[in-house]
Image (cartoon, rainbow, N blue to C red):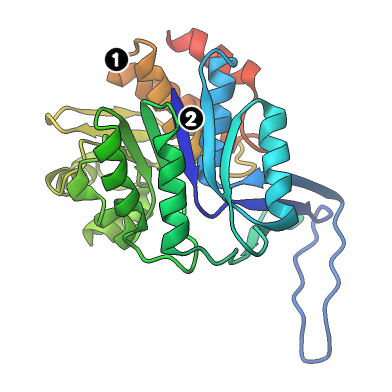
Amino acid sequence: MYLTLTLNPSIDYYIELPAGKKLITGTDDGPAVNRSVKESFEAGGKGINVALVLHRLTDNTAQVTAAGFEAGFTGKEIIRIIEQEGLISKFIEVPGNTRINLKAKDGNGLETEINGSGPAVGPGDISRLIDTLKKTDFDTLFISGSLPRTLNSDAYSVIMTAVQGFNPKARIILDCEGETLIKCLPLKPFLIKPNARELASLTRMKINTSSSLNDIREAAVKLIRQGAQNVLVSLGENGAYLLTGSGEYYHTPGIKGDVISTIGAGDTMIASFIYGIDNGMDMQKALGFSNACAAKAAFSEGIPGADALGEFLKEFS
């Protein structure tokens, strides 16, 4: 049974400008007016994306629960969206309003994001969340995304420590950045998934999507030595790389296509990789499967649907 955590979810508001039109910003003379030709709203947050992918892959045959914090009318809308999808919701209510993130794409395909800060969340709210997790049945926990602005960088390690106390057999998968991730590594997460930029920041090495596999392996080894059991590195158009705690390494090449939006691609990768392993794929197949699913996410709008994910599942099974 899968459980995902999204401590700082959002309503993502997507707008698209007419073809050829650039996004115009205001000047000292006054505000600029941009008019969209396309708009949509989605429940946002990396953990929610992971839950949606798992739900669509399992075709509702496995229990997928999404948890985290919600606030105000925007938080209620997130719960409505994910429950309508078929997910189990265990979000904790806090004062304020869940943030709204603006995702604007101009007529040339360039993306601009303005992300809200979200409600204030404190240590007492973390304790309430942990109490909820204790009453939830799960064997795999995904902890994904940024922390609320009012929490210290050790919030995820506090949650991990608590989970390992009351559910010691649970696998914990982490997808977060910087000091927040570094503080969790001694707790030996089953899998972490940095992209090339995050890998460079975590290891202070010069890494990008075009770096040699030897350089990527060297950087991933540093994270293994700090406690990660497995490191999955997303490399965009150059595919993905996996290093295991036993020293085995795998690479799958990139898939060519027209990128529409990279939002949700990494979440699709980490969810489909774990699902592949859970359904009998070896590491190489699971890596190829997750890379194909992530590419589909990048080449389309939003998280891939159940039909598309099912086709990849047939291909790699």
Q: Classify 213 as above or below 199.
A: above
Q: CA distance from mark 1 to mark 2?
A: 20 Å
- Check disc 1: other Cα within 10 Å, few if <14, some if 14-19, many if 20+: few
The residue shown at (31%, 53%) is 158
The residue shown at (17%, 49%) is 186
Q: Is residue 184 left or right of residue 20?
A: left
Judge by depth and name the residue closer to the eye, 125 or 196: 125
User: Mark 2 belongs to which amino acid?
Assistant: Ile
Instruction: State the image coordinates of residue 218 (x, y, percent, origin top left).
Output: 16, 46
Instruction: State the image coordinates of residue 6 (x, y, percent, origin top left).
Output: 51, 47
Q: Classify 237 as above or below 127.
A: above
Judge by depth and name the residue closer to the eye, 62 or 199: 62
The residue shown at (30%, 30%) is 170
- Residue 256 visible in image: no
- Residue 11 visible in image: yes
Closer to the chain start, of discs 1 and 2, is 2
- List the residue tagged with mark 2: 255
User: Mark 1 belongs to which amino acid?
Assistant: Asp
Judge by depth and name the residue closer to the eye, 287 or 9: 9
Label 1 residue SS: loop
Instruction: State the image coordinates of residue 4 (x, y, percent, origin top left).
Output: 47, 37
Q: Is residue 146 left or right of residue 212?
A: right
User: Nearer the viewer's eye, disc 1 or disc 2?
Assistant: 1
- List the residue tagged with mark 1: 282
Q: Classify 288 as above or below 145.
A: above
